[in-house]
Amino acid sequence: MKKLLGRVFCTLLVVNSLSIWVIGQQSYQFRHLTTKDGLSNSNVSAVLKDSYGFLWIGMESGLNRYDGYGFKSYSAELGLLPAKNEMERAEYATIRDQAVNVMFKQAVDTFDEILKSYDIHIERSMLPNLLCREATLCLQIGTPGFEFNRIDLSDNIRFIGALLPYLSENEDRKPWFDERIKRYKKIILVTQGTFEKDFTKLTEPTLQAFKDTDVLVIVATAGNGTKELREKYASENIIIENFIPFNDVMPFVHVFVTNGGYGGTLLSIHNQVPMVAAGVHEGKIEICSRIGYFNYGVNLGTETPDIEAIRNAVKEVLNNGLYKKNIARLNAEMAEYNAYELCEGYIAGLFGVQSTTSTARAY
């Protein structure tokens, strides 16, 4: 039976209520579940049952959990919030196990073989976890106020605050400004960062939500499709630029609409601007989940929010002072960390070298 379950490919066979009930000696009752029932993929590579009776189905595309009634899908990018009880902790443990042994098994095995070829024998794990766990020193961008509380946080991890973009001291540089900023009491800044070029995911729905309204919408495109967007959205309350120095514009902004890029998020915190976040890939789901969990803004929980969802989220952030209050508190916490001096101090201490900065801390 184990062999059968381990090699299900086209149809998942689940015995009545996740259990095998023997009728007589050879009679079994089977219920057939397929993608029509909610199974996210028919190419199943592993099946196991946990101590709570849930059936876990592992695939390269992710995980499915079956509770006897329906499936819950987990992709490779989860953005999991802190577990609220023992059942959730057990669920997360199963997800970690399946990630190592099913979803990313090929990558984990390949790297493990490379390490063993150099006579390095350590516990198999996904590369990001392995690097943090085995490093003598791990410098973590951010502060505790932007990270989930973990009782198992390794003692080699040091928070260093925000590593912000370099600011030129060129006195001849003219700061970016648009006169329309003076005419609007509600201003939102929108960007999808430098990598994401599909503006239908976030930028265009935001423009559609607020065009021809009393809200000024400022868009930074990173040089992608600027001309086309300007032609399509020519409303007086819309500004579309290739590039805008965020430290020039953010002091005027009331809400930052972002897909969760870490650089833009740190600049938003630095300027005390609450956020509306909508991102999943490239690890952005992790940033977005923290924005929502700590009420530094609203996390829409998707990469492709609809117009109404964006409009309602922006209005919520504009009208609820909780988000502004929370992000101001986080800004004050991050201001206590001098990232460059801390990095120098920790690295100098690691090698037993005296730091040249007065605020450096020995490792």
Image (tube, grey):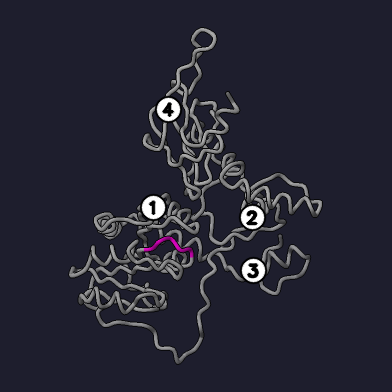
Above or below, 236 against 313 in this view is below
Q: Is residue 97 left or right of residue 235?
A: right
Q: Is residue 176 left or right of residue 331?
A: left
Q: Is residue 319 visible?
A: no
**Residue placed farthest to the top in the image?**
24
Q: Is residue 170 left or right of residue 101?
A: left
Q: Are marks 1 and 2 in contact (CB under 8 Å)?
A: no
Q: Secondary structure at mark 1?
A: loop
Q: Is residue 312 visible?
A: yes
Q: CA distance from mark 3 to mark 4?
A: 64 Å
Q: Are marks 3 and 1 in contact (CB under 8 Å)?
A: no
Read off the residue under disc 1.
295
Read off the residue under disc 4.
32
Snapshot quadrant of residue 94: top right
Task: Return the residue nearer the eye: 242 or 224.
Answer: 224
Q: Earlier in the sequence, mark 1 or mark 4?
A: 4
Read off the residue under disc 2.
157
Which quarter shows the N terminus?
A: top right
Q: Earlier in the sequence, mark 3 or mark 1?
A: 1
What residue type is disc 1 on?
Answer: Asn
What residue type is disc 2 on?
Answer: Ile
Q: Secondary structure at mark 3?
A: loop
Snapshot quadrant of residue 356: bottom right
Q: Are marks 1 and 4 in contact (CB under 8 Å)?
A: no
